[in-house]
Image: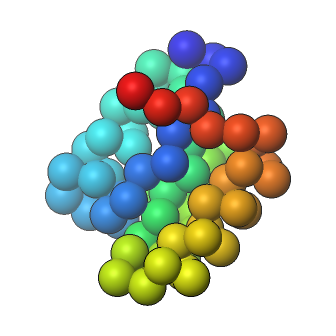
C-alpha cells in the first residue's frame, strides 16, 4: 500500500493511534490529526494539530495532508 495516503483523526491515542500505527506498518503514508498534533514517532508521518469540532481546523489539516502527500485515498 505504499502509494496510498490516509488522514486519521483522533490519532494521538486509543483507536486512532492503533489505526495510525497499523496503517503505517502496512506501508501507508499517514496524516495524523489530533489536538496535540503529534506524529507518534512514525517516520514520514505528518502530525497536524486539529480539533474536529472546528470545520476550519479540519480544512487546514486536510489541506496540509494533501499538500504533503499529493492527495488522500478513501475507502
Give how far across and how far down residue 47 sits, in percent: 58, 63
Give how far across and how far down residue 29 sits, in percent: 61, 35
Closer to the camera, 5 or 11? Answer: 5
Closer to the camera, 74 or 46? Answer: 74
- Residue 60 placement: quadrant: bottom right
Residue drawn at point x = 19 percent, y = 51 percent = 15
User: Relative to 28, is 13 on the left or the right?
Assistant: left
Count numbered badges in the picture.
0
| Residue farthest top in this picture | 1
Q: Is residue 59 above or below residue 28?
A: below
- Residue 56 placement: quadrant: bottom right
Residue 56 in view, yes or no? yes
| Residue farthest left in this picture | 14
Give how far across and how far down residue 4 sits, in percent: 60, 24
Q: Is residue 60 above or below residue 54?
A: above
Residue drawn at point x = 70 percent, y = 61 percent = 63
Amino acid at each position: 500500500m505504499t502509494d496510498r495516503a490516509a488522514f486519521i483523526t483522533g490519532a494521538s491515542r486509543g483507536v486512532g493511534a492503533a489505526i495510525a500505527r497499523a496503517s503505517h506498518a502496512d506501508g501507508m503514508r499517514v496524516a495524523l490529526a489530533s489536538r496535540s498534533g503529534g506524529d507518534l514517532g512514525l517516520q514520514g508521518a505528518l502530525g497536524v494539530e486539529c480539533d474536529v469540532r472546528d470545520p476550519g481546523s479540519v480544512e487546514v489539516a486536510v489541506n496540509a495532508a494533501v499538500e504533503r502527500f499529493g492527495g488522500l485515498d478513501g475507502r
